[in-house]
Amino acid sequence: MRLHHKSIVVTGAGGGMGLAVVKLLLDKGANVIATDLNTQMLNDFESEQLAVFEGDMLDETFVEKVFAEGNAKFGSISGLVNAAGIAQKAKPIEDVSLAEWTRILNVNTTLLFLTCKEAAKYMKKQGYGSIINVASISAVRPRPGLQAYITSKGGAESLTRALAIELADHHIRVNTIHPGPCDTNMLEQFAADGANIDEVKNTIFKQSVPLGNLLKPADIAYSIAFLLSDEAHMITGATLNVDGGRGI
């Protein structure tokens, strides 16, 4: 996968999936502009190819700063990976507050709008680019009690398709990844209050995957790297299920 000298913004870079993406892209020779609310986990990476920004990507001014300074440092914005996201504790809809609903949609959908909007400014000038939005297989195979989360991830996929057709004339590709249950700390956050976390992971999430195992963050990272690469130059508007068969 040809990623050498590509400069890629990664949101949610401090989480399990984001860290795996950052590590793989650096290993593949890319420049990485990594951002998250908490970037402490990125302290282990020491590379001239890495620029780290800690802050809130729902702050439009901060978003503009990340892209401007990343572009100034590396000379381009070749790609964007939106790995940022939050979970929802399973609960009946009548127990979901408006504040919780709004927060989940803001992080999982509005953040993508802000970053894709900013990325398009740079990519249109260059005449190329690749954007990957990480959604969820739950958008097409829902689970009970996750209505805000599922709505937000469905919105992420719809935004991706809308931008794919809008930006195609500028040779900017926009694709969605639908991960299945992935063995990260975030998976535990889907459990209802009082549930046994290990039991939920093994008897609910793991058993829902036809291939028989939870995904690892690296599984998602390799798929993202492919869609960012030149080998995927004719793929846009696509949704890639990386889910061990969960979406079947």
Image (cartoon, rainbow, N blue to C red):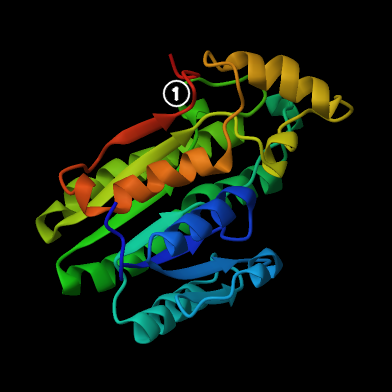
Viewer-proximal residue among 190 and 224:
224
User: Which of these two is toward me, 230 or 55?
Assistant: 230
Residue 170 shown left or right of residue 246 in the figure: left
Q: Residues within 10 Å of mark 1 (few under 14, many from 20)?
A: some
- Give percent across and percent down for residue 188: 75, 35
Total count of labels: 1
Residue located at (58% from left, 37% from top): 216
Write down the quadrant of residue 197 in the picture: top right
In this rendering, is residue 57 above or below 202? below
Please provide percent x and percent y for residue 246.
Answer: 50, 19
Q: Hey, which quadrant is residue 27 in on the image? A: bottom left
Residue drawn at point x = 33 percent, y = 66 percent: 119
Q: Position of residue 34 (x, y in %)?
A: 52, 68
In-image side of 9 versus 104 (left or right):
left
Q: Residue at x 47, y 76 (%)?
A: 66
Judge by depth and name the residue closer to the eye, 171 or 163: 171
**Which residue carries the number 1 mark?**
140
Amino acid type, label 1: Val
Question: At 18% from the left edge and 52% from the top edge, which residue is drawn?
Answer: 166
